[in-house]
Image (tube, rainbow, N blue to C red):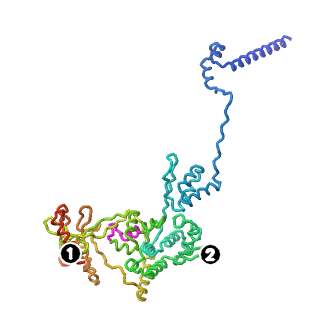
Amino acid sequence: MTSARTELGSMRLRDESNSTQSTQSTELQRSSAPDDISARLGGKFSADLDALLKKTPSTTPLEQPARKKEPKPSTKDPMIRTFARLRIQIGNFDGAIDFIQRHAPEETDWLRTQLQLVGKGHWLRKNQKSDQPIIQIKQIQHPALIDAEAGRIARAIGQFTAFRAWAYANMIDDGDGRVQRDQLERIWQETHICTSKRHARRIINEGIEQDYWTFDKRTKRVYLSGQLKVAQKLTQSAINAGMSYLVETNKPGKRRIKVDLSGSVGEASANLYSAWMSTKDQEREGITISRDMLCALWNVSIPTLLKWEELAKIRKQANYAQQNNTSIDNVPSHAYLTLNRDGTYASSWRLPNTYTVTGDLAQHPRTGKAKKVRKAVQREITQAEQRGDLGDAALPVSGKLYFTHKRGQNVMPIKACSDYLRKVSRSNSDVFRRRYFHIGRRHNVTIFEPYDLQTNTQQTHVGQRVIRRESDYRFIDARESYLVALAMEA
């Protein structure tokens, strides 16, 4: 009984203590001021109490529910691309870029592809807001391996579109000479040669008419013509069009070179023009050729050549000739009078520019079929000459006309000119045509002197002219009289 009473008493004491502690904890929770809690605890554990109060979050009577974000349009929604494509079709490229950036920025890559297909990969927004990023379209560069002379003839006779389409078709050919149509359309769209399936169909029909390939409608395969056949067809087309001068002096059959023919026709033509000059200038010392000759070889005007040279970043060096003999019979019609330091007169005239290609274009390490192509082209020209199809408008075959210092050689230009004339005289060539040798540079121009067969010596020097004294009225009168005499002689 004693143990039972003791156990019952202890249980009562435990219940009373538990009820007391629960009452105190309830009062602690109900009290909001930390001072009241400290007063109840009698100042004990004040530091721990402050730390606990800082960690407990403050409760708010009513929490506002988070506002739901409006769902963005799904990338699978066809209307997004439809609206953007309609803006591209009507030429509103700014509107297409703004629409995609506002409603579906994840479609930026798709928009970039669409702008490249229509040839507007370089388009940048003019009215773009500062807080919106501008879509940068990367220009795709696709080099094609071609014969630069064949490309020049195709450009001159109006077959450049089919020619560069044929060049890129050969780049994706695995060697069997046949390519699937869908592969051709894909590479043509990447290089901006065509912009739609209808455009690709026109190019395929054009290539069939001009013998660049044949097409099998059943298998959807394009069978490509070889390099030899294309060169023969280009030669025949140039002769039939009355432009035999395109192939008489500069024949196809050179070592092939890698050229980027993608982009617009102007950009591709500029790259081809630069590659053609690069093949003529193997030593990278420049090629000296007249504007008239370039216009005839490419069948374009001078403004077009200037535009190409600007796009291809071709450097131009001005050249002038001078001689002490002022006889009207020994100078061209565009010559003018100059004043020497000793008071005597000399004549000078402008020479063709020297063109230097800035970039390094990679030529194929092997000649390939170049020799066979040259023989085939020469065979076509000989047969046309026998038939009487060659016209009288052939370009003059002049040989080498300008002699400068060669890199790695110690031969003087006048000595090189003399040796060259001695060599060509054995083959009954025109040795009386005026040739020039380099004597120096003055005021950022190159000075040449005409070679004299009789004296075989240099007659002038680079610093003999005094330009500052040519403003004298007596010399001005003498120059005007000289120009009048030249005009009367012409």
Residue 121 left/right relative to 360 = right
Disc number at residue 221?
none
Q: Earlier in the sequence, mark 1 or mark 2?
A: 2
Residue 243 image point, x, y percent:
41, 80
Residue 227 image point, x, y percent:
48, 76
Residue 12 image point, x, y percent:
80, 14
Residue 432, quarter of picture:
bottom left
Res 228 visible: yes
Residue 128 image point, x, y percent:
50, 50
Looking at the picture, which amino acid does disc 2 mark? Lys
Q: Total of numbered circles in the picture?
A: 2
Residue 342 left/right relative to 187 = left
* Image quadrant where one finds the N terminus: top right
Mark 1: secondary structure: helix
Magenta region includes residue 179:
no
Looking at the picture, which amino acid does disc 1 mark? Ala
Mark 2: secondary structure: loop
Magenta region includes residue 280:
yes
Crowding at dot 1, Cα within 10 Å, few <14 / some 14-19 / many 20+, comes out as few
Q: Which residue is mark 2?
A: 217
Residue 377, quarter of picture:
bottom left
Disc number at residue 485?
1
Identify the residue at horizontal 18%, vertical 70% (top origin).
Answer: 346
Asked if disc 1 and disc 2 are in contact, CB closer than 8 Å, the reply is no
Crowding at dot 2, Cα within 10 Å, few <14 / some 14-19 / many 20+, comes out as few
| Residues drawn in magenta | 273-289
